[in-house]
Structure formats: structure tokens, C-alpha cells
Amino acid sequence: MDFSLLYPQNTEKKFKMLTEESINDLSIDFIAEALTNIKYEREHIRYLMTTVTDNPDIIRYRCDIFDDFVRLPQLRETMKELVKKLADLRDIERFQKDQEASSLWSLINRLREIDDYVSCITMMKSTLESLDIRSEGMLTLRQIVTGISDESNFDELKLDIDETLEKARSLKSITIGVNLDSMLRPRTAGVLSLNDTKFTDVGLMRRFVNFASRKDGLHEGADVSGFRYFHPANHRTSVSSKDDLPAGVDIETLTGDDQLSEAIKRPVTDMLRGTVNDIKSTLRRYINVSGYSLISLMPEILFYVRWAELIDKLKAQGMPVCKPEILPPEQRECSFRDLYNLKLAIKNVQGDSINIITNDIDFNDNYRIFILTGPNRGGKTIFTQAYGLAMLLAQLGVYVPASSAAISPCDNIFTHFPADENDTVDLGRLGEESKRLSEIFSAATERSVMLLNESLATTSVTEGLFIAKDVVKAMRFLGVRCIFNTHMHDLARSVDELNNEVEGDSKAASLVTGIHDGERSFKVSLLPPQGISYAKDIAIKYGISFQQIKDSIEHGSFGK
């Protein structure tokens, strides 16, 4: 069955991968860890978060499915339970061919596997039929599971499985003989009898001490056929520890995973040949109940569930979230109202107390390139990252951290943040930065998003400004959407000059982070750079303007 909760049927699964730099600069690992502490879930979610599709049909398909997960808590709870069952189903030893399943253990596992599969389909069918699902994806899934249930005659299958398992479970205990070496260590074992009642004798140790202390307590000449040497468990079913198992899977439920079971399974199978044949007969009737296509949906289900859980936590903190409107990609537009940084919001969910400021931003035919200036620690990097994360989440189909959002999907998000000094040994800071910018431009298109954070700030102001102007002109010529946050105020002052020098659809504008009465407001505004006024406000706030210092010296209070 070719079905996915991330891609509509008959749609090409086409996407681009975020670069390692973008993954790091957008804090993808931090977000994945906030979504789940289970390793295999985190790995799947991280992978999905690093894939970028700009197909509006795919994105709308995802948005609608995620909307169902957010609206319907019961859907999430059922899907979480389903994932546990699917994990158990996935990790039970697979039955490959009838002739290979010579042991009773393998056949019982196969019956349990089919039984779990029936339970998964039945549970999902019941839930999807009872809820107000609206998305194309979930409605299609409902049709699929209903069809599987009807075509496979699950009612009759369930009765057959229950009856056959009951026959197999009539075996309650096994009496075995064990040969010991001179140190009383077990060497070989053999089956003496199969019993339909449990062994309940609690005096084993007393009896052992009694006969071990008397010579006539030892039996002589015991000769039992069928003895077998102990040997390691089948490597295909061996599990070294509970840490290797997914959540919800119990190591004790995986039969055939210990030395004793492996040593005696052939005698047991031989002695229960009639039961084994009955089980094989039942399996042959339903051999087409296989493939278990639902297992392939596990990562996708977990993706929607974990994101919906996080969205609930954001809403509980009073933070705005919204389903994004998806515009045609060729428009290269996007607008956000009350946009905020998801990473900061997650830190608040985790117990921090951060005053989160929201902002509005519009990319359209008027402006698509913003040169962002402002004071140190004034929120430039936070705002730049907030925009990149919002674009990524919208295209993943997840609610956006904003009160409203409308986006033209981008084909990739490229970031250029300060490099680690260890990465600049060979080329130097400027050389390394230039090399990464060249790589970005070689991969970017007019539908790409670029996020530049203090780029080209490691050289002299004159050299940095010269290169930065060329970079902005190149972005305008290419047509990308970009936020370039920088301390080069002369770059922001030259936006009109840059727009006039190069033809292109992406015009540049100056954006500033605000400050009021010496306090950083973190609000972003479409204004010329305010470098001198910022410095003046900061100086006054900390009492280091010339007039303040002069007055303090004259009054004898300076330094006290």
C-alpha cells in the first residue's frame, strides 16, 4: 500500500535537505529534543524537519492532517497507543516462510503478530469512524483500514487465532532433565515430558539438599533421549537489553530469546507436532494478512502527535499559534503577525521565564530583502531565527508561532551565521565566510530564503562593507527573500543606492530593532538605521554620556 500522511497519493516525493549549517543555526536538534526524549522518535522527527518541500499541495495536505491532530485529542491518544502496538508488532520475530517456521515458538510469534495487527486495524477503524476528521489524509486512511478489515474478514480471523492460541497455550509446564559437570554446572538438557498443568512444588531446594546429602538420593543410570547442548539464542531475535527496545515493548514478550528456549524448542515442537500443524493451517488461510503497511506510518504518526502536544503547551502559556495560509510559490511572498521565536517559547515551556516579544513582517513586491540593524543583544539574531523557523514549520504542515501567517513556500532555507573558530584555521575568518556565501549562491534560486547573521563582520569595516554591498546586490538580482542582520549601519543606509544599481524583483529595505528610554523593546520597525541614537540612549541609561560623567565629577559622586 503506497500511502503516506506526509505526501498525498500520486504525488512525487520531492524535497531538498537543509544544510548542516542551517540545521545548527535553526536549532533543529534542540527542538527535536524538546518534542521527545525517546531516541528513535527524535531521530525520525529530526530527519523530517530537515526536509524542505515547496509543493503547495503537499504542504496543504500536511496542514489539514495536523489540524485534525490538534483539534482531536482523542485521535492523538489513540494514535499513541497504536504506535506502541506497531512497535511491538515490528519487533516480534518475523515469520518468513512456512517451512522455515519449524519451532512452536516461531509459530506462536507469528500468531501473536497477526493478532496484534488485527487489533491495530480494529482500533484505528473504530477511532476514525467515531471522530470528526476532515483532512484528506485521515479520511483516506479511514477508507484504507475499513477496506482491510472488510476484505480480510477480521471477525472470522480473530476467532481462528483465539482458538489456535488456546490450543497452544494448553501446554502449561515442561519437565526437563539436566546433566551437570563436577562443579554442578548445567551442561546439557533434554525434555522429559510436556504437561497441561503448572508445576507448583515449592520445596525444590529442600528436596535437593535432602537427596544431595544422601548417597541413595541420587538416581543411577538415567538415560533420556533428546539431550541437546545449550547454545546462544538466535541472533535475529536476540535483544541485549531493554534499552534496545522501543517504548512499550517488553523483553519478556519476545519468545525464543534465551538459551534454554533455544535448546528445547526442537523436542517441544516434535512432541506437539499436531498443534504445530494446526497453527500452520491457520496461518495459510490468512497468509495475505502481511506486509503490515501501517508500520511505515509510525514515524509520520509520531511526528504529528509530538508537534500537536507541543502546540497544546504553547497555547496553555497564552502564546498565539495558527494554521498557515499557503500561497503560490511563484509569488515569493509571506506575512506574519505576532511572530515570535519558537526556541524561546520552548524554553518557557521548560520552566524559564522569558519575556517574549512578537513582531510583524511582510515580504512582497515592495521589499524582500531586509537589512536589520540594532543594538547588541537587541534581538536581531532571535528575530532572524524566528522567521526561518516559522517558514520551516509552515512547510512541514505544523502550526506557526504567530497569530496569522501566509507564505509562499521556499525551496530551501540557507543560513550564514558566525563560524566556529576551529573551522577557519585554513582559510581564515573572511575566507571561510566568503567560501560559505559562494556555496549558498551556487545552490540558491529565486524561491530560496537566506538568513545572514553578522556576516562579513570579521574583517575591516571598509572591506566588509564592500563585500556586503555586492552580496545584497546579488540577492536582489537573484530574487531571494532575506534577512541580513548586521552592525554595518552604512549598509542599511545604502539600500536605495543598491536598489538603483541593480535590476531585480527583490528590493532591499532597512529594518531596525527598537529601543525606548534606554531600554531594549525588541520590536522591529521599517526605519532607517538608528546607530547614533541607539548609542546615545545606551550611554544615558548607564550614565556614561559626557554630560552625566561631567556632572558626577563636579558633584563629587563619580565612582561612588
Image (tube, rainbow, N blue to C red):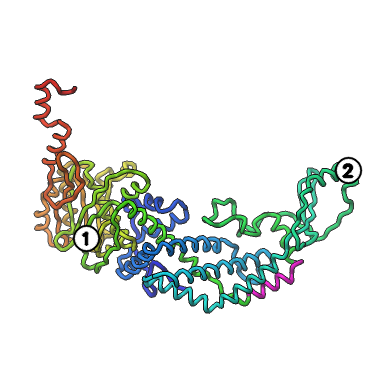
Q: Residue placed at 66% from the left, 59% from the top?
A: 256
Question: Going by the image, does 198 lie left or right of 548?
Answer: right
Q: Secondary structure at mark 2?
A: loop
Q: Which mark is residue 335?
A: 1
- Vertical arrangement, residue 428 with respect to residue 136, above or below: above
Q: Position of residue 120 (x, y in %)?
A: 52, 67
Tell which circle, 1 or 2, labels the residue nearer the N-terminal end: 2
Q: Residue placed at 20% from the left, 56% from the top?
A: 361
User: What span is in magenta?
Assistant: 270-283
Q: Position of residue 111 (x, y in %)?
A: 62, 68
Task: Count neighbours of disc 2 (C-alpha within 10 A) and say few if under 14, some if 14 to 19, many if 20 or more.
Answer: few
In which quadrant of the rendered view does residue 302 lie? bottom left
Amino acid beneath label 1: Ser
Query: Can residue 326 be seen?
Result: yes
Amino acid beneath label 2: Arg
- Determine which residue is flagged by label 2: 214
Q: Secondary structure at mark 1?
A: strand
